[in-house]
Image (cartoon, grey):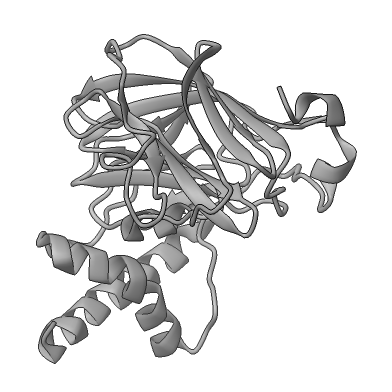
Amino acid sequence: MPNFEQNATARRLLKSLSVQLHSHGSQSRGTESEKRPESPAVSSTFRWLSIVRPGIVALALGIVSAPLATFAEEKLQPGIFATTPTVSLFDGKTLGHWTRADFGKEGVLEVKDGELILGRGNPMTGVLWKGPELPGSNYELSFEARRVEGNDFFSAVTFPVKKNACTLVLGGWGGGLTGLSSINGSDASENETTGYFEFQKGQWYKVRIRVTDDRIDAFVDDKPLTGVDLDGKQISLRIEMELCRPLGFASYRTQGAIKNIELRQLPAADKAN
């Protein structure tokens, strides 16, 4: 990318950050609806911004991070996942420990009627976990999700796998593709976990992901959806999904809704089941 385009991007980002910092005190806890700066629409540029944009802001302002989200007053304590068998990650009232994934030109992120709403983005909207450190193995993540409008993935979920992370795609590539991204460098559309599921618009689906030392397994409405043995596998993320690490949800030109997000530590007897 030419230097002049990088400089222009930096100026837009700094202006946006300045506006957000000044308005931080008046933000609503349950919504993230401020105007976002225009970002280049070219795919390669979008991917470049996904990696470089936070670095530009940090270098320009001389800071490492500047959280802009307003969290709930009652926060989960560090180490809670080691002491509590099942932990609710979303109270249905506020964003809590969740904050916007800065894809650029994302849709509105809000909490409404007990649901975490991912507005339709151009192309993506996402949310990521900023709470206590999550386990990387021997846990189950469960949630309910529905496609509100649109025809692509509505709640692609990124989750920890040991020291790495992986994404379960739900309804991608035009509406029905499922699978895990990425395995040995191949995404959900081109590896052994590729599948198809006909998601009905407006219908809630119960999703459960089990991660152990040896496997990843995913279920929809308590029926097996996909899975993979981890032995000899390299688990990684598509570059754009790095913004949802270690845990996050994203939609693609689609509005999605999520609720009842929970994480359960697996007792020894459950790890093989």
Horizontal side of 197 relative to 1 (left or right) equals right
- In the rendered view, would you say 53 is above or below 224? below
Query: Relative to residue 81, is residue 209 drawn left or right?
Result: left
**Relative to 20, does residue 4 appear above or below in the rendering?**
below
Tally of numbered discs? 0
Q: Looking at the image, can residue 157 be seen?
A: yes
The image position of residue 111, as x and y in percent, is 48, 31
Q: Nearer the viewer, residue 10 or 103?
A: 103
Residue 202, above or below 217: above
Location of the C terminus by quadrant is: top right
Which residue is pictured at 53% across the width and 20% down the height? 114
Where residue 110 sits in the image (x, y, percent)? 43, 35
Q: Is residue 27 visible?
A: no
From the top left corner, tell me how far across and down residue 101 is, in percent: 41, 53
Which image quadrant: the N terminus?
bottom left
Q: Which residue occupies 20% across, 86% down?
A: 7
- Which residue is pictured at 86% across the width and 35% down the height? 84
Closest to the observer, 160 or 48: 160
Residue 17: image location, x then y, percent: 38, 70
**Furthest residue in direction front, as rendered:** 232
Residue at the (54%, 80%) spot, across then down: 64
Q: Nearer the viewer, residue 161 or 46?
A: 161
